[in-house]
Image (spheres, rainbow, N blue to C red):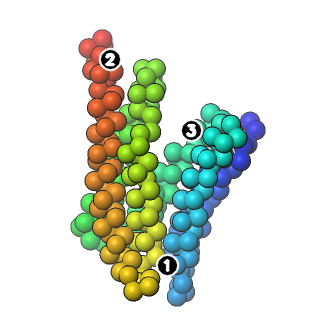
Amino acid sequence: MKLTVPTMLTLLRIVLIPVLVLVFYLPFKGASVAAAAIFAFASFTDWADGWIARRYNQFSAFGAFLDPVADKLMVAVALMLTVQKHPTVWMALWAAVIIGREIAVSALREWMAELGQRAKVKVATIGKVKTVVQMIALIFLLYQAPLFGLPIFTIGEWLLAGAALLTLWSGFAYLRAAWPSLKADAENS
């Protein structure tokens, strides 16, 4: 298997997960800023690997499989770190909604692939918007400190709530797109 640049960026994102955890827990004053920077860099590689793959036609089946896995792992870990540091009901609820939707949509895509209908649950615009809002929210939540007088953490909390709502919306959109195929499969079983 030949590793393309996009796949290497995806693998880098996975390697950054334990680095993010380690830096998050290091006892130094700038740990939260460093953790936010690591997550921001990982988020950038998510965009960059897709752009490079499309621009230079560097697609691979392994990369297509690994990219969403890396994204979900990075987001889940960042959410767990955030909830552990700020264990509020709302933070836990938003994290549960986001992680639960990711698991459900992954399962839905797997099922649709088995039915030969994977194209019906391809990434939609709402999913991309959700991802951007979610990544910005997590960068702000990991950063934790005011910036230029702005309450970055509070803004991150509101953005995470928005990301959770977009997560539900996009999850329902995927389910609605898949429903005719799922219903037909259930009737034929």
CA separation in Å, label 3 and label 1? 31 Å
The residue tagged 2 is 185
Query: Residue 145 is drawn in which quadrant?
Result: bottom left
Query: What's the residue at 29%, 45% (across, down)?
Result: 169
CA separation in Å, label 1 and label 2? 48 Å
**Mark 2 or mark 3, which has the lower sequence index?**
3
For label 2, count other residues whose C-alpha is less than 10 Å away and answer few (under 14), some (14-19) or many (20+).
few
Query: What's the residue at 54%, 66% (across, down)?
Result: 40
**Mark 1 or mark 2, which has the lower sequence index?**
1
Q: Which mark is residue 142?
A: none
Q: Residue furthest top?
A: 188
Relative to the observer, which residue lies in front, 135 or 8? 135
Query: What is the x, y in percent for residue 20?
Result: 55, 68
Whether residue 97 is visible here, answered yes or no, is no
Q: Label 3 amino acid?
A: Phe
Query: What's the residue at 51%, 51% (across, down)?
Result: 71
CA separation in Å, label 2 and label 3? 24 Å
For label 3, count other residues whose C-alpha is less than 10 Å away and answer few (under 14), some (14-19) or many (20+).
few
Q: Label 2 amino acid?
A: Asp
Q: Which mark is residue 65?
A: 3
For label 1, count other residues whose C-alpha is less than 10 Å away and answer few (under 14), some (14-19) or many (20+).
many
Q: Circles 1 and 2: CB distance less than 8 Å?
A: no
* As drawn, 70 above or below 36: above
The residue tagged 1 is 32
The quarter of the picture where the C terminus appears is: top left
Q: Circles 2 and 3: CB distance less than 8 Å?
A: no
**Element type at marker 3?**
helix
Query: What is the x, y in percent for residue 180?
Result: 29, 22
**Mark 3 or mark 1, which has the lower sequence index?**
1
